[in-house]
Amino acid sequence: MQAPAINIAESLGKMESYRSNRSNVLPNMLSNRSNRSNRNTGTFGGPSYRGAINNRSSGFSPLVEDADHPASLSVPSSTTGGGSSAPAAAPAPRRTQNFVESVASSGPFSLSKEELVEIVSFDNRDKESQVQVLESYGAVEGIADKLRVNLDSGLNAHDGFEDRTAHFGRNIVPPPKSETLLELIWDALHDRILQILIVGAIVTLAVGLAQHPTSGWTEGVAILVAVILVVSITAGNDYFKERKFKQILMLQSDKHVTVLRDGKEDQVSSWDIQVGDVVLLSVGEEIPADGIFIRGTNLSVDESPLTGETVPVKKSPTRPFIFSGTEVKAGDGAMLVTTIGELSTGGRIQAMLNEQSKTATPLQEKLEKFANIIGYIGFGAGILTFVGLTIRWIVDVAQKEWEWDHMRSLLDFFVIAITIVVVAVPEGLPLAVTISLAYSMVKMIKDQNFVRHLSASETMGEATCICSDKTGTLTENRMSVVETVVGAEQRVHTSFSPSTIQPFLLEPLCEGIALNSTCFVKYNEGETLPVFVGSSTEGALLVFGRKLGVEYEEVRENATKFPDNSFPFSSDRKRMTTLVKPRDGSAPYRAYTKGASEIVLELCSHIATPQGAIPITPDHKAYITSNIQRMASDGLRTIVLAFRNSQTLPTASEEIESNLIFIALTGIKDPVRPEVPDAVRACQRAGLIVRMVTGDNILTAKKIAQECGILTADGIAIEGPEFRALTQERRDEIIPKLQVLARSSPQDKFDLVKRLKALGEVVAVTGDGTNDAPALKEADVGFAMGQSGTHIAMNASDIVLLDDNFSSIVKAIRWGRNVFDCIRKFLQFQLSVNLVAIVITFVGSVAYGESPLSAVQLLWVNLIMDTFGALALATDEPEEKILERPPHTRDESLVTKGMATYILIQTIWQCILLIIVLFAGYRAVGVDSDSEIEIYTLVFCIFVYLQVCNLIMARHLTLELNPFRGMFNNKLFCFLVVLIAAVQAVAVQVGGDFVRTEALNGKEWGFCIGLSLLSFPVVINARIIVRFAMQHHQAPSYERAAGTRANPPAEFELQSVNVQGASPRNAGAFWAKLRAASMFLSMYRSNQGGDDTTSHHSQSSRKSNEARFVALRDDDISETRM
């Protein structure tokens, strides 16, 4: 595992030219800074998080513990200490020019950015030597002085930072250099088929000029112009795509970072970090810049991206250097930023990546294979056409006197054959999927979905189940304490003020809330609700403490913590403990613990009373437990707060978190987001199962799941420990019905995701914590929380939910399905055009000895299909009805039977029409049979306008009878339709020999447009016939019960991809409505009379009709919901 570290270090060593003089610079630094090493550098990290601050005594009456009380424990003490001695002065070597220049250019600061890079750099230098260099500058305090920053309060927030930015730069690494438009054009010209076509055009130009110097240039030049147009538009699309992806990459690099400014914690963009900032680090965060350790609690950093070693490195005064691109694995702490942007370790590595790795998505790979098959067919068609034309040419030439001019025909045949291959090869497929993915990514950002991996968009279209967190995703994450049980009191508090809590409990309760927490609360201007930076549960407790009259900031500023003997919250332990020095001096040490109610309660051996801590009795536990269950059943999150005093310094968590004293039980309300129940129902209608996976109490989880519509009458809710204890066979039995997994650990979530995938599900998972990263990686699509999620969770995810809202996942499903549908729309359009073009070219060539469609005309059709068609069909937005069908499966064919039917209808219709026009139809407008160019112009014109109609109808993959429905919502589509029609008209009227057309008169234009518009009634009637044929089929319900697969049976594959909801079931619904209307008329007539002799018959007939009507109506309702 060492090889990666060596390679990276070597690469970093080559990044900066000034590194070449490092062997001289380092001894020089040691020598010239050695007199400063006698300066008192202080200690790295005081007893509290922000350094040692004088304790403040308070007047509250403590809980006194002595030898008579078991709660007063004797724990073996441990001592800490250490220091650092000044390094010995090294012999002063000759100053290098680089060093002198860097010092001279340090400007308003005593250090240059080059010096800072040397002080904090990741390379092969001996770490002890690196620490000596740091100490020669006065250690971290000396660096802070030179950077004009106070380590306890951070930078001045009111400073505009102009001088810092000018001197040290910004914390931005420019994205990889994009290809210019000219480079993209050059890349497009490397297409082998286009190169052959260019050669053919040049030969045609040369031969034409030799034979007809004045007019022989037109065909060759026309082909070249058409090729240039195709290449330019293709390159333009690529250029647009690259710019969009570049914007997305820049957005992806921006992260929120917590800094200390003016003594207050604040969140800023990683782009706005300054050299000299004090950055606060916590578990799961990615280090945003290079820096020096100031203080921390068990701060461990994963440096495997740099070293290849998987063991986290614990940061301390002896290992103080922290590098960008690494991640915090444990603990928390603070660092002084020294190097940012391209000069930081992570920035230099990123700068070395000249271009992003481009990997094809599964859909792109599938389309590549599909395009190759079509390309082979087109190649065969080109050869067949060339052979047919050549045979016809041989027969004709054999009957004539030989002239060298006849050879010109062979060249024309070759160009036609190559052009057929160009038209047949669907190079627009990759363009269509790229445009669709890029378009959906941009649109999904507006829907609060930031897509990190392209394949995630299309995979969401296949998703069959969602494993969702509760807090912040299904709920609002606006927590507030609404109920408490304090000490041994046998009552529940629902309103809070200092007078509601007994004085002897008020101080330890509020001190524990303030100190055993890493969250802080902000009140933004113009907003009444607080903003929690950190855990929302802790934020709710801090607000609760404020209601009790205690400001957590004051408590924290005057507290002494013991970070090495504290234990942060983890999903496995489900509790957090902080060791402090009590402010009242009642004991040397006090541990505050909070966490999951039933877990912390089990650790309590005593309970707080006015007389002190007394042993907790079964009655006490029963009362507290009953309130836990009641609160949880009401959907409240229950948290128990406890503490213990100790005479000696405890070290192990087992020592600290045992024999605790119960202070309070709190019930925290987190309302369900109002839009979530509808979003869950939408997922269920779309054939997805929604499962809640949460760390909360099972009663709380079940209540919230019922409110959301997740937990049904026959669904299973189970706790993590019970789930872990099941055998694999038993798990497989309950997983199909599993809807709630409570008190779950990250491992439980990972195991559930892995098993669901093994059972054939396509799984989407949400997560926000560092420990969720394995499950996010394992899932087919991982959703990280953009507001509450850690950087590690985000890096492991495929999509980041910018608003942490479950309803945004539903939007991702819509866009995922839409990507697949857009590709299918484009496929059925392009394949129908391809087939018609090949058939007409071949038939006309064999019949007339030349192609009815010239090379230029075919290239224009190719442009319509590949570029304009891709732009038009790949930018359709999803409709709500897209969620009224099941997800498509991974092995599902790209071309369904319904698409094949549409392609067949269009091909047969267009070929019949064009062949009739080619051989006889032209006579309808008085065109003479000898006017070949005019006949070919009619064919060309009708062919193109048929494709305009085809483009409009290909927007629907269903049996839609209104081809214009939704079209005007896509302005780009409408523009392209008008553009194609207008350019075609101009080309025909003024193209002349260049395009090989003759201008048409009004009658001929009416003839062309009228025949083209016949496509609408032809296809609509064909769809009606298909609907009629399907009316006897009964479609299954696609709304999934828990654990059932949502795949329709094979007989409904005909319209298995129904974007607009006109599925087989809706076709059935159409006819059901007609039958219902018929029954209604029959009932009406039977009610209109008849004599008495027929009244009994009429009454029974009416009842029968009513029954049949109700049955038909119910069928209709069930069908429309499928």
Image: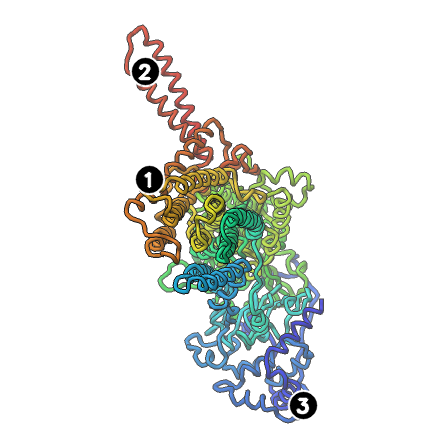
Identify residue type, mark 3: Ala
Q: Earlier in the sequence, mark 3 or mark 2?
A: 3
Vertical comparison of 1072 with 431: above or below: above
Vertical comparison of 1077 with 125: above or below: above
Q: Earlier in the sequence, mark 1 or mark 2?
A: 1
Mark 2 lies on a secondary structure that is helix
Mark 1 lies on a secondary structure that is helix
Nearer to us in this view, 868 or 443: 868
Nearer to us in this view, 289 or 60: 289
Instruction: Please state the total of marks drawn on the protein image.
Output: 3
Q: Quadrant of residue 1087?
A: top left
How far separated are the C-alphas under marks 1 and 2?
Answer: 54 Å
How far separated are the C-alphas under marks 3 and 2?
Answer: 114 Å
Residue 414 picture location, percent across and down: 52, 54
Question: Is mark 1 in CB contact (under 8 Å) with mark 2?
Answer: no
Residue 965 is marked as: none
Which image quadrant: the N terminus? bottom right
How far separated are the C-alphas under marks 1 and 3?
Answer: 105 Å
Q: What's the residue at 41%, 51% (across, down)?
A: 872
Q: Residues within 10 Å of mark 3 (few under 14, many from 20)?
A: some
Residue under numbered circle 2: 1086
- Nearer mark to the viewer, of 1 and 2: 1
Residue 603 picture location, percent across and down: 63, 53
Asked if residue 1043 shows in the view, the reply is: yes
Q: Is residue 321 left or right of residue 201?
A: right
Q: Is residue 673 left or right of residue 646?
A: left
Q: Is residue 647 left or right of residue 805?
A: right
Residue 89 is marked as: 3
- Nearer mark to the viewer, of 1 and 3: 1
Vertical comparison of 215 with 387: above or below: below
Residue 924 is marked as: 1
